[in-house]
Image (cartoon, coloured by chain):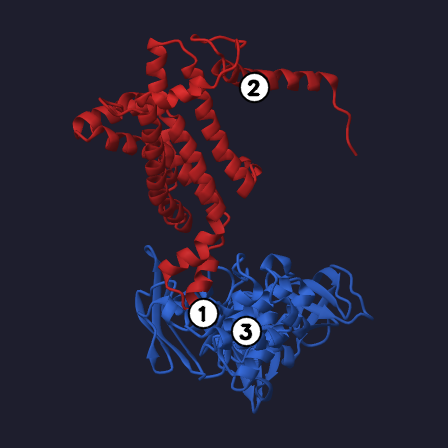
Chain colours: A red, B blue
Amino acid sequence: MKQPLHPALIAFSVVVFFFLVAPLVIILGAAVSDTTFLTFPPQGFSTRWFVKIFEMSAFRRTIVTSLEIAFLATGLALLFGLPAAYALNRYRVQLPSWLSTMYVLPILVPEIVLGFSLLKTVAVGADMPVFATLVAGHTLIVLPYAVRVISASLSSFDFSMEEAAISLGSPPLKTFFTVVLPNVRSAVIAAFILAFITSINDVSVSLFLTGPGVSTLPIQILAHVEQFFDPVIASVSVLLMVLTVGVMAVVELTLGLTFLAK
Amino acid sequence: MTQPLTIDRLSAHYGKVQVLEDFSLKIAAGELVSLLGASGCGKTTTLRLIAGFLEPTGGTIRLGEQDLTRLPAHRRNIGLVFQNYALFPHLTVAENVGFGLKQRGVALPEREARVTEMLGRVELTDLGDRLPAALSGGQRQRVALARALVIEPPLLMFDEPLSNLDAKLRVGMRAEIRQMQRANGTTSVFVTHDQEEAFSISDRVAIMQAGRIMQFDTPETLYSRPANAFVARFVGFENLIEMRVVARKGDLVEAEAAGGALLTLSQADFGAIPDAFVLGARPEGLVVAGPDAPGIPATLGLRSYLGRAYQYLCDSPAGPLTAQGPLGAAQEAGSAARLQPVAAQCCILAPEA
């Protein structure tokens, strides 16, 4: 039984969809334009601006830096977030209820404020190297995703399973890996991806923490736009999009995107 | 193989709240003992202390010669069956059952043989490759039972294992558990809040309240000779009437209830009757008779139909009572009557301090 769709609903959907997709189409068009300035619709067709990205050492360097930071920050966030999510659920009764809220704070605090305070305390205050500061900052902003996503999955986990395993002779730590982890595996993957994408695309925190010689891709894009107005900026944006879509595609193929919507 | 469990002066606290106090219990080898009580009585706490999921603040737990009190849970070698089955959803039925053997380093060929044998015993031979999600509630509980039994533990514990099953299945599973336990002769602790379940499955039952054992006896003794008012109420002695002996004639004792009603009781039915005592009577243990017969004078109130008899809420000088009368003679509310005790459905208790 399929209900016929109201024409207004169809029209509205098309408009929304158009506004969502149009900017992406424009960027994509501008990226392949055979001109030396940003223009849409594209004049001619060329892939030279994509080649140009990799010819410019600043972009090459920041792409690598962004990936390094994203992997490290996401890894660290999972390393801290997984045990935290476990403890928050396993000992929910014993722990104060505000504790789980603490782990969402980095999302609630405006990122600009977070970036600034990290600059004051970690970068300037503790005099940490720029790269380490960036990793620390990104770990902080992606930690909430790790904790929340894994927590959501653990909240329906029946901890008597863990006790069953222990009663059958499995030591507690081993039980975590053989019984708990396999049952929250997809949440861990989802948390990884959400955190990774958040880190790769972050501007506000990175803006404060980048320093001489070390920058991330979004910051480099900003810096480039300030000085030039060539299609490189469009092609690098396309690259960032492809990276994000690529990660999402991996999720879609392994778990299904509906999983993230849960 | 099978061993006695000795719990000596165990106490436990949640924070500052004492949930178990000076708790002692001796379970003979091969015996099945139920811990019976309402939620919050400490029965599950006791089970978790024995399993090692909680640490006692005092006392000892011994299984045979071994002191379990400070042993980590995973080294206690106790088979546990949980209320919600607690099967591992990411493992097949056979892998679930083989889990404990794997922890013990049993080689694969032997492991498979023992798992197959155990699945045969719980009649799940063909379901070894399924995931738990594909099983019914009864099948899941059988997998849980197989998983606990296959490690051949000296002690088996059940935490309300039947309360998630429907009524019919529950009675069937109960018999299966009992047969399996008898066949293996494994010492067992069974936690439940269901009196019928506890009485039907156990050698002995410990009725618990507020972290203490109120009475520990065979179901038969608990049912007919409760040791105190709490247990008496628990097993259905709804009427508790305080009485005082006024005359003794051989085995016969004449006693007076509050309000002056006189009853004659025989020590041949009850054993020695002390001078002050409480008469416990089930509703069917107080029979409605005519207003001129001997017995406790009462005014009949609300009548309800039970199928085999009528039950009356009554008002008497000794307080509100519940009695039963024959189907042939329905009485109207407000009529005067006498209530006569039936010895087989009554008990004698010491007065409460």
**Do the residues marked 1 and 2 share a common chain?**
no
Q: Which mark is residue B56?
A: none
At x 56% / y 19%, what residue is drawn? A21
| Other residues around mark 1 within 10 Å, as few (<14) / some (14–19) / many (≥20) | some
Residue type at mark 3 is Val
Q: Circle 2 is placed at which residue position?
A: A21
| Parent chain of label 1 | B
Q: Residue B168 sits in which quadrant?
A: bottom right
Secondary structure state at the residue bearing disc 3? helix
At x 67% / y 75%, what residue is drawn? B340
**Do the residues marked 3 and 1 share a common chain?**
yes
In depth, the one of A112 and B173 nearer the eye is A112
Residue type at mark 1 is Lys
> Residue B71: x, y in percent?
32, 70
In depth, the one of B46 and B302 nearer the eye is B46
Residue type at mark 2 is Val
Secondary structure state at the residue bearing disc 2? helix
> Residue B74: x, y in percent?
38, 67
In depth, the one of A161 and A251 nearer the eye is A251
Depicted A43 relative to depicted B71: above or below: above
| Parent chain of label 3 | B
| Parent chain of label 2 | A
Tell me the distance, in whole angstroms, between the alpha carbons under discs 3 and 1.
Answer: 11 Å
Q: Circle 1 is placed at which residue position?
A: B102
Viewer can see residue B16: yes
| Other residues around mark 3 within 10 Å, as few (<14) / some (14–19) / many (≥20) | many
Tell me the distance, in whole angstroms, between the alpha carbons under discs 3 and 2.
Answer: 57 Å
Q: Residue B55 sits in which quadrant?
A: bottom left
Depicted B149 relative to depicted A200: above or below: below
At x 30% / y 68%, what residue is drawn? B58
Q: Which mark is residue B115?
A: 3
